[in-house]
Image (tube, rainbow, N blue to C red):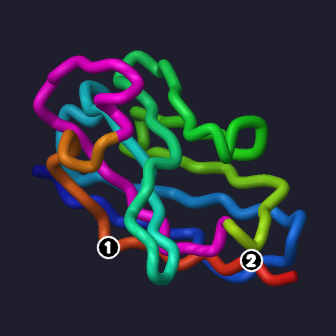
Amino acid sequence: QVQLVESGGGMVQVGGSLRLSCAASGEPFSTYNMGWFRQAPGKDREFVAHIRWSGYTLYADFVKGRFTISRDNAKNTVVLQMDSLEVGDTAIYYCAASTTGVSGGSYYWSQQRNYDSWGQGTQVTVSS
């Protein structure tokens, strides 16, 4: 497992943007498959985005075209750029890592159980 620390959350108005970062402590970070999940009050945690070690990306349908996931292997960091934010995006956002080297498809990486390390989360609040 690795240590993950999220930052960049906060409060923003509808239509605004936020940039979440996730700093990972482990090596070799470049081989990890990384994801972002979120949990809104009273709801289950849900998949948001994923980036493989190769740079290939996956997104939940509700964020396509609005959110962008990227990684900087030199800085051991994954970034979630969130634009055109909506009230429904209000949630705690969690960074997750899979360090096992296991490969999988879209459904596999949308499942929380396939990630072995999690951050503490960062709050995102979108107001109207």
Q: Which residues are magenta?
A: 89-110
Left/right placement of residue 115 relative to residue 33 reads: left
What is the secondary structure assignment of the residue under circle 1? loop
Horizontal side, residue 102 vs residue 21: left or right: left
List x then y, in percent, for residue 36. Answer: 44, 50
For disc 1, the marked residue is 120
From the viewer's perspective, tell me whether residue 126 is left or right of residue 26.
right
Magenta includes 93? yes
Above or below, 83 relative to 97: below
The part of the image, by quadrant, that contains residue 103 is top left
Report if residue 119 lies within the magenta region: no
Report the residue at 54% width, 48% height from top: 79
Residue receiving disc 2:
126
Numbered disc in front, either 2 or 1: 2
The three-letter code of the residue at mark 1 reads Gln
Return the disc, 2 or 1, that comes first in the chain's sequence. 1
Q: Quick check: 70 above or below 81?
A: above
- Front residue (pair 121, 128): 128
Name the amino acid, label 2: Val
Query: SS of the residue at dot 2?
Result: strand
Query: Which of the 4 quarters of the picture holds residue 23?
Result: bottom left
Image height check: is 123 above or below 82? Answer: below
* Residue at 76% across, 45% down: 66
